[in-house]
Image: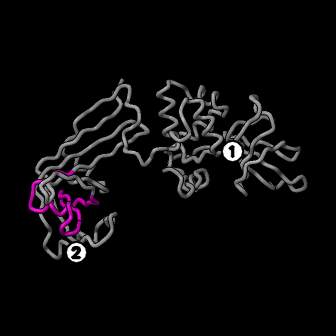
Amino acid sequence: MQAHLGDQLVVESPATGVNRRDGEIVGLHHDDGTPPYDVRWSDTDEVTLVFPGPDAHVRHLEHSRPPAPSPLSPDTRATAAVSTPPQPAGAPHVGDIGRRVAEERHRRGLSRNETAGRARMSPEYLSYLEEKPADPTVATLIRLADALGTTVAALRGGGIDLPPGQGHALLHPMLRDIGPQECLTLLSTHGVGRVAVTAPDGRPAVVPVNYEIVDDAIAFRTAPGSIAAAAADAEVAFEVDHVDDALSQGWSVLAVGPAQVVTDPAAVRSLTRHAHALPWAGGQREMWVSMKPTTLTGRRITAADR
């Protein structure tokens, strides 16, 4: 019996052949993949040392997944539901760990086969990890981190509370300007942006706000007397950006123009009714401010074509 990390150990009933128990192999004790194994049991999520008996067999990862159906196959949705495991509550976003693994592997010039060999896992499992919504065990992450010369915390997105952009820069970055139409498209994804204003005390200030795009205008709600409310009847700057630390890429959009309070009751009701999110800051924020950009510029960092 031989296994790779990520394979499944299945224990069957000798009488009926029905699975009695199964679990993921999360630890190997021999380089050739022979027993014993550290197994994380699916019914208890506990990891135990297992010496498989005659009623056990290994289900290899590459044999456990059905072949991908044609994109037009009527069974596509059903197959995806079976082969894509649900993301555990509190786990990183789908594919985040895999993207960090792939990026670190590319950064170090390692192939999947080389990385899998160093981490003592099958290349098929590494491929699955990089491309699917996988939730690898701590044991798997420890081996990958060691193989890639990094840490488990880094692969899991440790330091998520730190400001974005602390990852390594691309070896061959390309900075390009973004045209107005693309800027508007990026703005239209909604979310959180930053408005730059002159505060009531005369000092410059930048505050984050939830915003909407309505008829090419940027609208956000705030409370009268707040710093963001100082944008009313003034020329302000509004900035939105996205930084992908896993890929060392990102973009930013800057809008500049006059802002004013929305006073029409029907317009206020429409903005409130169609808002994509409540203000994260909470509280009573019924004052809508709208800014019509007179200039719209942006920049994007990507990997240069080589």
Q: Residue lying farthest bottom?
A: 265
Q: Nearer the viewer, residue 281 or 73?
A: 281
Q: Residue at left 79%, top 33%?
A: 34
Instruction: Name the spot of residue 293 as percent of width and height, x first.
Output: 14, 52
Q: Residue at left 55%, top 29%?
A: 149
Q: Amino acid at mark 1?
A: Ser
Residue 225's tag is none
Q: Is residue 161 above or below residue 102?
A: below
Which of discs 1 and 2 lies nearer the camera? The answer is 2
Instruction: Name the spot of residue 55 as percent of width and height, x first.
Output: 87, 47
Q: Residue lying farthest right?
A: 15
Q: Nearer the viewer, residue 151 or 71?
A: 151
Quadrant assignment, res 222 = bottom left
Residue 269's tag is 2
Q: Which residue was labeled with disc 1?
A: 64
Q: Residue lying farthest front?
A: 201
Q: Amino acid at mark 2?
A: Arg
Quadrant into which the C terminus falls? top left
Extent of the magenta region: 209-238
Verify whether residue 17 appears in magenta. no
Q: Residue at left 30%, top 30%?
A: 174
Quadrant assignment, res 124 = top right
Q: Is residue 114 above or below residue 127?
A: above
Q: SS of the residue at dot 1? A: helix
Q: Residues within 10 Å of mark 2 (few under 14, many from 20)?
A: few
Q: CA distance from mark 1 to mark 2?
A: 54 Å
Q: Residue at left 37%, top 43%?
A: 164
Q: Nearer the viewer, residue 209 or 111?
A: 209
Q: SS of the residue at dot 2? A: helix
Circles 1 and 2, Cβ within 8 Å, touching? The answer is no
Locate residue 80 relative to residue 49 in the image: left or right: left
Verify whether residue 222 appears in magenta. yes
